Amino acid sequence: MKNPYDVLRMKEQELMRVRKEMDALRIAVRLLAAEDPGGANGQSQPKLHQVVELP
């Protein structure tokens, strides 16, 4: 049987990794949107949704 504290620690580390990946993707989306020539022609940009974080 696994130690619950070890499992919790691993899940917290995994959550931190995923949050960092999400931050990197948000930055990439902004950079790509800034380079998109279609955005200057009046084409609508896809809207980004805010993620609600639960405690």
Image: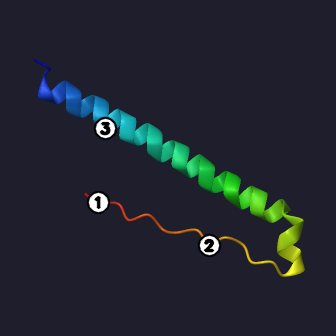
Q: Residue at x 76, y 63 (%)?
A: 33
Measured in 3D between alpha carbons, the distance from the residue under mark 2 to the one under mark 1, in whole angstroms, is 22 Å
The quarter of the picture where the C terminus appears is bottom left
> Which residue occupies the extreme top position in the image?
1
> Which residue occupies the extreme bottom position in the image?
42
Measured in 3D between alpha carbons, the distance from the residue under mark 3 to the one under mark 1, in whole angstroms, is 14 Å
Q: Earlier in the sequence, mark 2 or mark 1?
A: 2
Q: Residue at x 75, y 57 (%)?
A: 31
Q: Secondary structure at mark 1?
A: loop
Q: Residue 26 at what x, y percent from top left?
A: 61, 56
Q: Check disc 2 and report the residue beneath it.
A: 47
Q: Amino acid at mark 2?
A: Lys
Q: Earlier in the sequence, mark 3 or mark 1?
A: 3
Q: Residue 48 at what x, y percent from top left?
A: 58, 68
Q: Check disc 3 and report the residue beneath it.
A: 12
Q: Residue 39 at what x, y percent from top left?
A: 82, 73
Is 21 positioned to the left or the right of 45 in the image?
left
Specify the label residue 54 is tagged with. Answer: 1
Is 25 positioned to the left or the right of 19 in the image?
right
Q: Residue at x 69, y 52 (%)?
A: 28
Q: How is the image coloured?
A: rainbow
Q: Are there few (<14), some (14-19), or many (20+) residues within 10 Å of tag 2?
A: few
In the picture shown, does residue 54 fall above or below 49? Answer: above
**In this figure, what is the number of numbered marks?**
3
Q: Residue at x 38, y 65 (%)?
A: 52
